Amino acid sequence: MDEADALLIERAMRHVDNRTRMLLYWCYIKQAQPEVVCRKMSIAHRPATVFVEQFRQAQAAVESLLNKETA
């Protein structure tokens, strides 16, 4: 990733909802374990697929915004 990519991601993050932003913050910036993220964000930690699905949706939301911005 270079500075241009970082700028695009930063811009996209401004447009996602707060819950998505916080989920990605806990996972990428804080690098917290899924159990911690679930506890902090009131996400069911069992089954694990609940967390995985929400995490993937958050990633997809940012990716969708990035695709719109670069198109």
Image (cartoon, grey):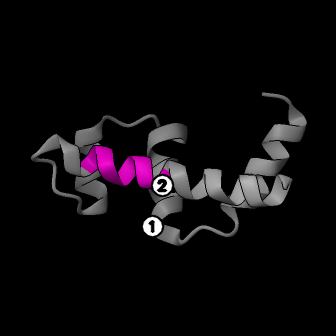
Q: Is residue 32 left or right of residue 7?
A: left
Residue indicated by mark 1: 19
How many discs mark residues in the rendered view? 2
Residue farthest toward the left in the current orientation of the protein: 46
Query: Which residue is at 53% across, 52% downward?
Result: 60
Q: Is residue 13 left or right of residue 6?
A: left
Marks 2 and 1: which is nearer the front?
A: 2
Q: CA distance from mark 2 to mark 1?
A: 9 Å
Please state the horizontal and vertical placement of residue 28, each as a whole percent of the image: 52, 38
Residue 57 highlighted magenta (yes or no): yes
Q: Amino acid at mark 2?
A: Ala
Q: Quadrant of the C terminus?
A: bottom right
Residue indicated by mark 2: 58
Viewer-proximal residue among 34 and 67: 67
Where does the magenta region start and end?
A: 51-58
Query: Which residue is at 70% across, 66% downward?
Result: 14
Please state the horizontal and vertical placement of residue 63, each as a whole percent of the image: 63, 50
Residue farthest toward the front in the current orientation of the protein: 71
Viewer-proximal residue among 35 and 59: 59
